[in-house]
């Protein structure tokens, strides 16, 4: 894990993100449309983690947090979530989940019938995910 870098995703990462997210049993609907809000854990060209922000009218849904099985429990997911939430704060987003997000595939997919909405206030005066 010494060469692992957390960075903003690009369109070139999409196939690997979809495979990772789908392999984790998470919804892939909407990933391509919101790729500009995604971060990846890149291990020498292999995408081993992802986290995305799906934005709707000034609010964001933190979604698709997935880590390759071999790297789970090593803080990769936490690094990705910190990057995504930090980006939300920089964009001026102050709530992580809002009822306006209910049209997201994360909530409309039958596989997400038990999804729970949680809110994370994003304040300027504290480090995100610390």
Image (cartoon, rainbow, N blue to C red):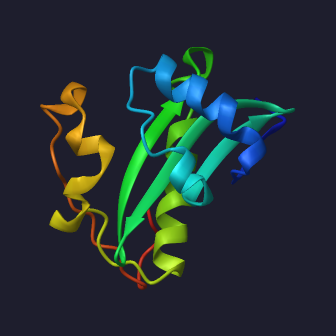
Q: Is residue 5 visible?
A: no
For the point 21% across and 41% down, the residue is 108
Side of 62 where 51 appears, left or right: right
Measured from the top left, where is residue 105 in percent x and y? 31, 43
Side of 88 where 105 appears, left or right: left
Quadrant of image for the N terminus? top right
61 to 77, vertically: above or below: below
Q: Choose between 1 and 60: the one closer to the eye.
A: 60
For the point 67% across and 39% down, the residue is 14
For the point 23% across and 25% down, the residue is 111
Quadrant of image for the C terminus? bottom left
104 to 92, vertically: above or below: above
Measured from the top left, where is residue 12 in percent x and y? 78, 42
Measured from the top left, where is residue 7 in percent x and y? 72, 53
Q: Is residue 11 visible?
A: yes
Residue 41, picture quadrant: top right
Q: How many marks?
A: 0
For the point 84% across and 36% down, the residue is 3
């Amino acid at each position: 894990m010494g060469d692992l870098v957390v960075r903003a995703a690009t369109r070139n990462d999409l196939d690997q993100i979809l495979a990772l997210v789908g392999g984790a049993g998470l919804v892939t609907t909407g990933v391509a449309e919101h790729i500009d809000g995604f971060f990846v854990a890149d291990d020498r060209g292999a995408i081993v983690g992802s986290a995305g922000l799906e934005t709707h009218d000034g609010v964001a849904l933190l979604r698709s947090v997935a880590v390759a099985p071999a790297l789970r429990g090593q803080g990769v997911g936490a690094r990705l979530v910190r990057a995504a939430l930090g980006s939300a704060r920089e964009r001026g987003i102050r709530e992580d989940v809002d009822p306006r997000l209910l049209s997201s595939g994360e909530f409309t997919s039958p596989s997400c019938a038990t999804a729970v909405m949680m809110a994370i206030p994003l304040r300027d005066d504290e480090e995100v995910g610390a």
